[in-house]
Image: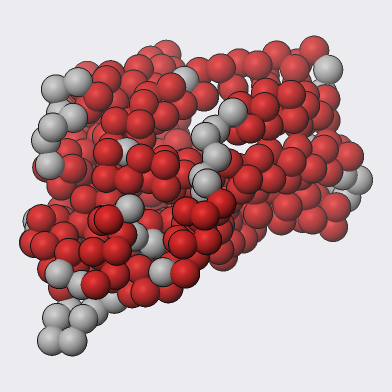
Amino acid sequence: MAADLGVSTPTVFAAFSLALAVSALVGTRAGSAIDRIGGRPVLMATSLVFALGLAGLGASQGLYSLLAAWVVLGVAMGCGLYDSAFAALVRLYGKDARSSITGVTLIAGFASTLGWPVTALLEANFDWRVACFVWAAVHLLVGLPLNWLLPEVRRAEAEAKATVAEPAVSAALPEPGSRAPLVAAVSLGFVFAATSFISTAMAAHLPGLMAAAGASAATAVLVASLIGPAQVAARLLEFGLLRKVDPLLSARVAVALHPVGAAALLAAGPVAAPLFGVLHGAGNGLMTIAKGTLPLSIFGTQGYGRRQGLLVAPARVSQALAPWLFGLVLASWSQWALVLTMSLSAMAMLALFPMRGTRLSETRSESPQASVGASR
């Protein structure tokens, strides 16, 4: 892409970072829209925006058209990725959405398994522009009809929801004499940002990290190939044995797995690289689910979409910064760059431990707005 457009390779990645920043800005508005009218119209519109952005990327001719296409894709990302899907499911199923959230992440865990080979095949046999146009067509011909099949929220219910939307959102704000909801929201925002930084850094720099740890290229490929199946296996575990477990416990386990694997890699060297890949992938798989179920467990269903947009906004920013920042640390510290991700995991664990989902839910249920929401 860089050679075709006459820009540097870092510029191409900077454009992607710009899209992540845009997605952080629009996520809250998308969540609020889902709270009011349900996920079906929002996600259908997002399919169109994704197709427009990908088509624009495929047709780009230079720096400005590249940036413009990624801005459009950033809007689509803010409205149509996991967090919007979670909000749509909570809008439909309320407090019973956990199984559906897990099911979505279980199926979507195969996205890279399909997406990377298909994209590589298109790029090798045609070029990157054709790959963009093909994925734009997939959004129109597959994504749009599937989103159209989502159950539609009844108009009367949507209007009633809109009437109480603002009071419902206030349930996440501190009540007189209580700072617990605000502290929990800030803590969750940090946990999501820290874990997103780690997952994005590993995705961007895993081969370089394995090489710095003394692993061969073949071992690096093996580790990369283990992460996807480990994510799916962990999600299957969540869907089965852990489905009745407190989401806070699942989140704590998820956060703990990366530093355990990293410590093993630093202590034992390349022989522990496969173990690192399995543990990191499993933790990442569980954490994806936790990003949907934790806010539901702690704050409930009222204003879920808007709150979810607020909670993941810092994570989008950390994702945008992670490849660059971790790359600098890796270049300076070699494999000991893992100390940074282990430290972030430790801080995320400390942020999770004081949380009590049931206590906040009980506090919230005493409010009139929560009672109105519960009656629905």
Residue drawn at x 43%, y 22% is 107
Residue drawn at x 29%, y 70% is 369
- Which quadrant does the N terminus fall into? top right
Residue drawn at x 26%, y 56% is 374
Q: Please tell me whether residue 181 is drawn above or below residue 223 in the rendered image.
A: below
Question: Would residue 216 be seen by someone viewing this image from the given angle?
Answer: no
Please tell me which residue lies in front, 9 or 183.
183
From the viewer's perspective, tell me whether residue 58 is left or right of residue 181: right
Q: Please tell me whether residue 71 is drawn above or below residue 101 in the rendered image.
A: below
Residue 351: name its quadrant: bottom left
From the viewer's perspective, tell me whether residue 247 is left or right of residue 50: left
From the viewer's perspective, tell me whether residue 65 is left or right of residue 289: right
Q: Please tell me whether residue 309 is drawn above or below residue 117 in the rendered image.
A: below
Residue drawn at x 25%, y 24% is 239
Horizontal and vertical percent position of residue 217? 44, 19
Horizontal and vertical percent position of residue 131? 76, 25
Q: Please tell me whether residue 340 is drawn above or below residue 120 in the rendered image.
A: below
Question: Would residue 85 be seen by someone viewing this image from the given angle?
Answer: yes
Horizontal and vertical percent position of residue 364? 19, 67
Please tell me which residue lies in front, 159 or 317.
159
Horizontal and vertical percent position of residue 302? 34, 60
Residue 4: name its quadrant: top right
